[in-house]
Image (cartoon, rainbow, N blue to C red):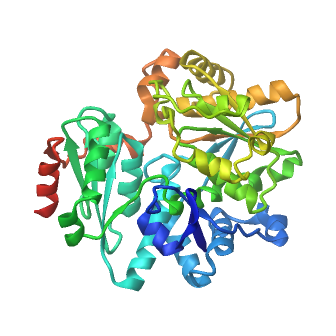
């Protein structure tokens, strides 16, 4: 696979270079130069395949020029021991549950595949790397779980003190081994600044092979395409056009769906659903993209005013707005609408949704109401509701929401984290020691 920078198509990289570099030198994003199609035979039998069998076929289609098929199979098997099931919620309306991985968030798919792929390249090259990650919650937990005890990789996670939930903090600080947690006396922006400065520091780069595990790495985008294929396999029998509603913040999730679409997945339409951070729905409506500072909402993982992956989303359509809006509709909803949807779906069906999931549900319903089309509608659930317990209990008017054992057990584990200031000198000293 050859990849190019979205800022300069002549600036190219191999898959291995793109995985470890994350971003091109010009700070664009890596995009595949050529997107191959999956076979008709694969799509004809997809409903009979497991998630891992689907992941292998898609990976093989994309990566077989870089990695032998036998190794691709091992990479997939090492990454995934969990599924992406759909749950029927209402007539012809399905929820794609992406929270069955170890950190109970959709980011497990990207983080674990990335760790497995990096490990393959590192074993081949006999190198070691040190990954630095700044997190406001779920990214750190997924990276911690995904890279835990992976040979050749050490991980340092920086998180803002007092600004993540108890469960999220325990996901960051209870693993040990090759995963270290730093509790920073500052904000998420301070954590991010420390990481960026470390990548620019000559002394640190002479001592370590530093790498990033952020969400714009192409090796986190590729595996997110797998669950779109898996969802299609589970609704194929319905015999209706398939529509996906995607709760969107940085737009990596939707970009992964578009990758699957360009590989030949039969998708009728995509819905980009956001909270009040609605720059992309506005773009889809008016044709002009105007990033703005983000505003705080209860669906906080989607509080993004300048989505990093926006350029990927439009690049799949040659940056042609008319082409984009043919395949993607955009809607946005505020906190009150989100809480109302959470409450009404629970009252009518007994199904619990996190606020991000509820936003996606609302987008699907809005699309169906406006178009009057009969479709198999799939909305994505990006995290388990218990990770947003306070919001869920407030929306439902109860404090008796059950927490899964996998999360509640974390609360009794001892936190192990090193407290540091937001000053780079302290962070550098810690790394050098």
Query: In x, y percent, where is residue 152?
Result: 32, 74
Query: In x, y percent, where is residue 48?
Result: 77, 64
Query: In x, y percent, where is residue 125?
Result: 38, 84
Residue 174 appears anywhere in the view = no
Q: Quadrant of residue 249?
A: top right
Residue at the image position 34 percent from the left and 84 percent from the top:
126
Residue at the image position 61 percent from the left and 51 percent from the top:
312
The quadrant of the image that shows the N terminus is bottom right
Instruction: Please say if 105 is above or below 121.
Output: above
Q: Quadrant of residue 190?
A: top left
The quadrant of the image that shows the C terminus is bottom left
Residue at the image position 45 percent from the left and 77 percent from the top:
120
In front here: 111 or 316? 316
Residue 57 appears anywhere in the view = yes
Query: In x, y percent, where is residue 206?
Result: 21, 71
In front here: 195 or 106? 195
Instruction: Please say if 408 is above or below 285.
Output: below
> In this rendering, would 416 be left or right of 286?
left
């Amino acid at each position: 696979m050859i990849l190019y920078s979205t800022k300069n198509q002549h600036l190219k990289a191999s898959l291995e270079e793109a995985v470890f570099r994350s971003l091109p030198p010009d700070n664009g994003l890596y995009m595949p130069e050529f997107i191959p199609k999956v076979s008709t035979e694969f799509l004809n039998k997809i409903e009979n395949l497991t998630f891992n069998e689907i992941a292998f076929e898609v990976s093989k289609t994309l990566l077989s020029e870089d990695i032998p098929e036998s190794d691709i199979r091992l990479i997939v098997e090492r990454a995934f021991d969990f599924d992406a099931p759909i749950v029927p919620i209402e007539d012809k309306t399905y929820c794609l549950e992406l929270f069955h991985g170890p950190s109970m968030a959709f980011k497990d798919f990207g983080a674990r595949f990335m760790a497995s792929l990096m490990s393959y390249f590192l074993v081949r090259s006999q190198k070691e790397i040190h990954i630095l990650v700044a997190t406001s919650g779920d990214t750190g937990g997924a990276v911690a779980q995904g890279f835990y005890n992976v040979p050749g990789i050490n991980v340092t996670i920086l998180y803002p003190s007092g600004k993540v939930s108890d469960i999220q903090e325990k996901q960051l600080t209870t693993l040990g081994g090759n995963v270290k947690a730093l509790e920073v006396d500052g904000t998420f922006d301070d954590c991010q600044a420390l990481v960026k400065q470390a990548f620019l520091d000559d002394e640190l780069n002479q001592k370590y092979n530093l790498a990033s595990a952020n969400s714009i790495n192409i090796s986190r985008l590729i595996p997110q395409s797998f669950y779109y294929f898996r969802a299609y396999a589970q609704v194929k029998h319905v015999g209706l056009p398939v529509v996906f509603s995607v709760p969107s913040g940085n737009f990596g999730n939707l970009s992964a769906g578009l990758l699957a679409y360009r590989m030949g997945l039969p998708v009728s339409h995509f819905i980009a659903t956001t909270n009040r951070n609605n720059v992309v729905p506005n773009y889809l409506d008016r044709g002009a993209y105007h990033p703005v500072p983000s505003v705080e909402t209860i669906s906080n993982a989607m509080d993004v005013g300048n989505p990093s992956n926006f350029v990927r989303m439009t690049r799949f359509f040659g940056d042609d707005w008319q082409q984009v809006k043919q395949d993607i509709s955009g809607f946005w909803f505020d906190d009150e609408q989100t809480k109302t949807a959470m409450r009404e779906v629970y009252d009518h069906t007994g199904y619990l949704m996190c606020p991000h999931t509820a936003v996606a549900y609302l987008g699907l319903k809005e699309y169906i109401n406006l178009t009057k089309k009969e479709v198999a509608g799939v909305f994505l659930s990006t995290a388990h509701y218990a990770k947003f317990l306070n919001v869920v209990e407030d929306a439902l008017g109860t404090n008796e929401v059950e927490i899964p054992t996998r999360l509640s057990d974390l609360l009794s584990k001892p936190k192990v984290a090193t407290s540091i200031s937001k000053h780079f000198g302290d962070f550098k000293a810690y790394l050098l020691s």
